[in-house]
């Protein structure tokens, strides 16, 4: 799969403290990559570096196979940024600011005007075009911020906490816009500490902690990954021998006998271990009548992953 | 650096920018003071050695030399820091290179002040002409070049301070302190090398030319000082761009 963003061994420090340390990951083209982490984990710093607002202390960034340190100008043409704080020139109208940004993006005056109006309509601000941005609500500013990022049809859209501070209606609108953009082929890279929104809209996620990527993959992978998942096994002829046999398996953290013939097995494994456990029990004379994996929520997986990397 | 992006930034700032009205107001006020001083100078004709030949250009040149930097201070101190403080710089820097942004901001201020000093230069010569003297095109051009380059030096200095500052309050304080230091350096007659770092040194060196028609020996002095100020601006702007390129926004 082709990569839209490739980060290799990225370092960034403020004073003596490293906020990003040996950060490496890839974002597939056409995916919605959720960049998850607690406050202060280094999400905004990564986004600032990706969009040319901050200078890294080491590492390499390839965007659409172009090196950010060598071809920053070309990269800026294919990148759209939605910063965390959507502050604009309060005294100017939404359309006037869009026209200005459009010209900076390399569009002619007429093209800029046309595209600005279309994008403002797309984000639901068609009736607010000639109003001063100072009178806009937080949600409207956020939508304007997304509109300016979509000028000149970017290939990659980078959003820093896109739903932060929005009411439920605003959150739904922004998520829908992100989905629409992705449907149109735009790769999305969105940071957030809101697990629910990540779970809903992202195809891939990476979890950042103290400047390091502690885990990444698809939503399903993450749930399995690092999770102390629980597998419930029903065995007709449950015996202490079978329990001790299961406890002896490398990835089994602990077992709990819930009823006479129901065993809960806590596992720590990145792969699906159900077939292997089933085979082990059956080969040792166990008569299995039930084998269920209790899927963890992403929140559980996230908390599990971050706690385990303490 | 992209010339068309510099033009877009400067053009937008001049016509629609949030600081546009503020800058137009202060630059017009400076021009108005110069014109006012020239107008009332006829009442003070007795102060000059040749009352029939009032040096209108000289009067306005001295006003620009003395109070011009203060007008630049109040208009340029937040040219970059305001965008950084408000966060609007992120939208711009994610679209264009940093050098174009800094140079666009410089051009915005420089063009407005250069335009208004040009108006002052014309008014000065018209006053000169209506007082019965010749319309001296050469002096008009020298006045315009020196005034605008002199103010350009200060714009580049305060842009540098604005780049270094995290917010507008720090930017204003640092700019005021730097202006004080510049004046101090200029006044230090004994420490000549420090004077070379100050724009007034080059401008005052040609102030006598604004009184009378330049003699043959004056041309070398004029060219030398014009060139020095141009180099000063280019050097300061280069530092501005280098520093801004290393800044986290």
Image: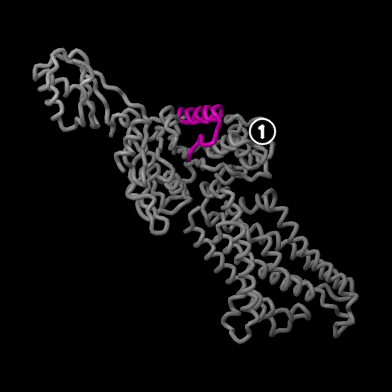
Q: Quadrant of the N terminus of chain A?
A: top left
What crowding class fits label 1: few (fewer than 14 Cα within 10 Å), some (14-19), or many (20 or more)?
some
Secondary structure beneath label 1: loop
Q: Position of residue B165 (x, y in %)?
A: 56, 60
For the point 33% across and 32% down, the residue is A301
B76 shown above or below A188:
below
Rendering coords of residue A156 (x, y %): 45, 38
Relative to B217, residue A190 above or below = above
The stretch drawn in magenta includes residue A310: no
Q: Residue B43, position in %: x, y?
A: 91, 75
Query: In the rendered image, which residue does mark 1 sit on?
Result: A128
Q: Is residue A244 visible?
A: yes
* Viewer-closest of A218 and A214: A214
A220 or A267, nearer to the observer: A267
Q: Is there any visible trace of residue A74 in the rendered image? A: no
Q: Residue at x 26, y 25 (%)?
A: A230
Of residue A265 and residue A121, the one placed in the foreground of this image is A265
Can you tell which quarter of the image residue B125 is in? Answer: bottom right
Tell me the chief SS of the magenta region: helix
Q: Is residue B235 left or right of residue B221?
A: left
Q: Which residues are magenta?
A: A160-183
Circle 1 chain: A
x, y (%) of residue A214?
Answer: 32, 41
- The answer to if A162 sits in the magenta stretch is yes
Instruction: Tell me which residue sits at (58%, 58%) in the image.
Output: B103
Image position of A230 with respect to A17: above or below:
above
């Amino acid at each position: 799969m082709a990569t839209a963003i490739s980060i290799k061994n990225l370092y960034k420090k403020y004073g003596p403290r490293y906020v990003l340390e040996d950060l490496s990951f890839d974002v597939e083209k056409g995916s919605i990559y959720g960049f998850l982490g607690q406050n202060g984990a280094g999400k905004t710093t990564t986004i600032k570096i990706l969009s040319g607002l901050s200078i890294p202390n080491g590492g390499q960034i390839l965007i659409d196979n172009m090196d950010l340190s060598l071809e920053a100008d070309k990269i800026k043409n294919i990148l759209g940024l939605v910063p965390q704080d959507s502050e604009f020139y309060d005294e100017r109208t939404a359309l006037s600011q869009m026209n200005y940004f459009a010209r900076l993006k390399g569009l002619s005056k007429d093209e800029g005007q046309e595209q600005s109006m279309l994008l403002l309509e797309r984000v639901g601000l068609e009736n607010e075009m000639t109003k001063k941005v100072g009178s806009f609500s937080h949600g409207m500013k956020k939508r304007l911020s997304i509109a300016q990022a979509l000028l000149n049809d970017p290939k990659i859209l980078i959003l820093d906490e896109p739903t932060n501070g929005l009411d439920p209606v605003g959150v739904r609108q922004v998520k829908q816009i992100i989905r629409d953009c992705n449907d149109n082929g735009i790769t999305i890279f969105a940071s957030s500490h809101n697990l629910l929104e990540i779970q809903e809209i992202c195809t891939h996620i990476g979890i950042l902690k103290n400047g390091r990527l502690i885990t990444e993959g698809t939503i399903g992978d993450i749930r399995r990954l690092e999770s102390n998942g629980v597998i419930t096994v029903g065995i007709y002829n449950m015996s202490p021998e079978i329990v001790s046999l299961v406890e002896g398996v490398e990835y089994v953290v602990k077992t709990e006998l819930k009823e006479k013939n129901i065993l809960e097995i806590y596992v720590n494994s990145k792969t699906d271990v159900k077939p292997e456990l089933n085979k082990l029990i059956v080969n040792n004379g166990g008569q299995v009548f039930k084998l269920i994996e209790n899927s963890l929520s992403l929140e559980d997986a996230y908390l599990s992953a971050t706690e385990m990397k303490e | 650096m992209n010339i068309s992006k510099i033009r877009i930034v400067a053009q937008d700032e001049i016509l629609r920018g949030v600081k546009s009205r503020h800058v137009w107001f202060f630059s017009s006020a400076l021009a108005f003071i110069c014109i006012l001083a020239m107008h009332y100078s006829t009442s003070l004709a007795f102060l000059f050695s040749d009352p029939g030949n009032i040096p209108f250009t000289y009067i306005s040149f001295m006003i620009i030399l003395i109070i011009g930097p203060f007008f630049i201070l109040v208009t340029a101190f937040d040219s970059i820091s305001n965008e950084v403080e408000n966060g609007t710089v992120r939208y711009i820097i994610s679209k264009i290179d940093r050098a174009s942004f800094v140079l666009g901001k410089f051009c915005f201020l420089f063009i407005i002040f250069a335009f208004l000093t040009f108006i002052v230069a014309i008014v000065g010569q018209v006053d000169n002409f209506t007082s019965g003297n010749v319309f001296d095109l050469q002096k008009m051009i020298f006045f315009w070049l020196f005034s605008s380059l002199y103010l350009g030096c200060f714009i580049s200095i305060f842009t540098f301070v604005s780049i270094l500052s995290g917010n507008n309050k720090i930017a204003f304080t640092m700019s005021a302190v730097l202006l004080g230091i510049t004046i101090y350096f200029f006044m230090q007659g004994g420490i000549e090398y420090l004077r070379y770092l100050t724009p007034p040194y080059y401008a005052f060196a040609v102030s006598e030319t604004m009184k009378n028609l330049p003699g043959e020996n004056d041309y070398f002095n004029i060219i030398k000082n014009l060139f020095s100020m141009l180099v000063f601006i280019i050097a300061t702007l280069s530092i501005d761009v280098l520093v801004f390129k290393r800044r986290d926004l």
